[in-house]
Amino acid sequence: MTDETIFCIDDFERLARGGIQDETFQDYLYGGSGEGECHQRNIDSLKKILLAPRACAGITKRDLSKKMLGKTLSCPIGFAPTPARGWLYRGAEKCCMELACEEGASNCLTIFSASKMEEVVKGIPENEGVKLICTGFLGTEEHQLEVMERVEKAGLDGIVLNLDRAVPGRLRSEAGGPIKSAIMKKIGLPNLPKDLFQAYIKNENVDRTVFGDGCDTWEQVKWWKANSKLPLIIKGIARASDAQEAINAGVDAIWISNHGGRQLSDCPATIDLLKKIAPVVKGTGVELYIDGGFRTGSDILKAIALGADVVFLGRPVLSALACAGDDALREMLKILKKELDIAMGLCGISSLSQADESLLWYPKKK
Ligand SMILES: Cc1cc2nc3c(=O)[nH]c(=O)nc-3n(C[C@H](O)[C@H](O)[C@H](O)COP(=O)(O)O)c2cc1C
């Protein structure tokens, strides 16, 4: 990885796309539901908010650290869960976890990851990074208890429940034949309870076989909170009223997400959802995470200024892995930290706790 080829996060995607020959696979990784409108909206809406520079702030050093689930991250950045990491190359999941933790960031596996959670976490010091795994209400309550126990024993720091896939969104890449199913059956799903994987082998639809009929309820969230010893994070929240439900259910963190624009194509951009949701969460002690279209350190600062604690990235992690594995992933974090540091310096703040809406500038519509 050299500075000549990579200047910003989008360069990883450009390079990665050039190397992925199979167009359908490329579309699966980078596309969104419908015509990709929601994915593009996430990116465009971030660009519609600007940052107001401040002069003579007298700041020489910036502190990028943030608290997350009782730990201190060196930067407010996490890798969002995507099963596809392990399809790019063997060992990619371990690389993501090791690197994120080494750099003081967070990483989230999924229950559909190609590597065993125990192996991914093995050897990483307990105090480094924040290690998460994402699942849904899979199978029966017994299956869910089995997963909970396994996650606790493996040494992860929290469980993420994904609530935005009650019905799978319609992706163009999936129209000609489900790529996901084919690859998962071939590679295996070592984090699923064995009988669920066996059932899935006989069935085409991984989501429905594993997660059932999509009839998710807040009672189930409360059941998870009552049964899990680990912090519980709810991913896929897009309404202030749902954030309030999650708070009532006792969750530890809320993760605003529209699944990277892969579910409801008419969903608003996550940065706009953050403006509605942050006031509900503020002062409750519940942490607030976000993802969807974040590609620069400035984008990250905007979310922090609006009340987010940690910002996650999905596709850029896949792009970096596809370009040059851990070297590229390290470079990606380095670039984001540098950009965040510069944006903080130019906006005149020395710590992220000083980031608030006074930093933001909304151009007037003509
Ligand atoms: C190829 C792909 C697969 C994904 N699979 C999952 C998944 O299994 N579970 C999940 O919670 N989110 C999944 N996501 C959504 C990401 O976790 C994250 O919300 C999204 O990618 C963030 O947007 P960004 O890619 O613009 O950064 C997936 C995203 C992509 C691109």
Image (cartoon, rainbow, N blue to C red):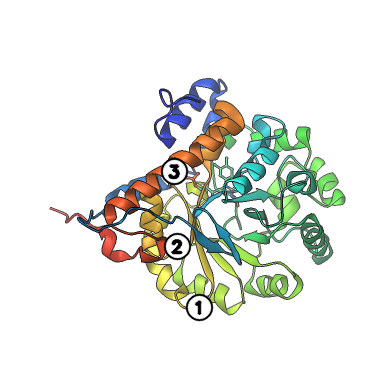
**Circle 1 sits on which residue?**
284
Quadrant housing residue 29 = top right
In the figure, 288 relative to 245: above or below? Answer: above
Label 3 near ligand 1 (CB < 8 Å): no
**Circle 2 sits on which residue?**
308
Tell me which residue sits at (50%, 56%) in the image.
Answer: 257
- Amino acid type at circle 1 is Thr
Q: Is there any visible trace of residue 287 in the rendered image? A: yes
Tell me the CA gap for discs 1 and 2.
13 Å
Residue nearer the viewer, 338 or 240: 338
**Circle 3 sits on which residue?**
336
Q: Residues within 10 Å of mark 2 (few under 14, many from 20)?
A: many
Mark 3 or mark 1: which is in front? 3
Residue nearer the viewer, 297 or 249: 297
Mark 3 or mark 2: which is in front? 3
Secondary structure under tag 2 reads loop
In the figure, 248 relative to 112: above or below? Answer: below
Residue nearer the viewer, 20 or 57: 57
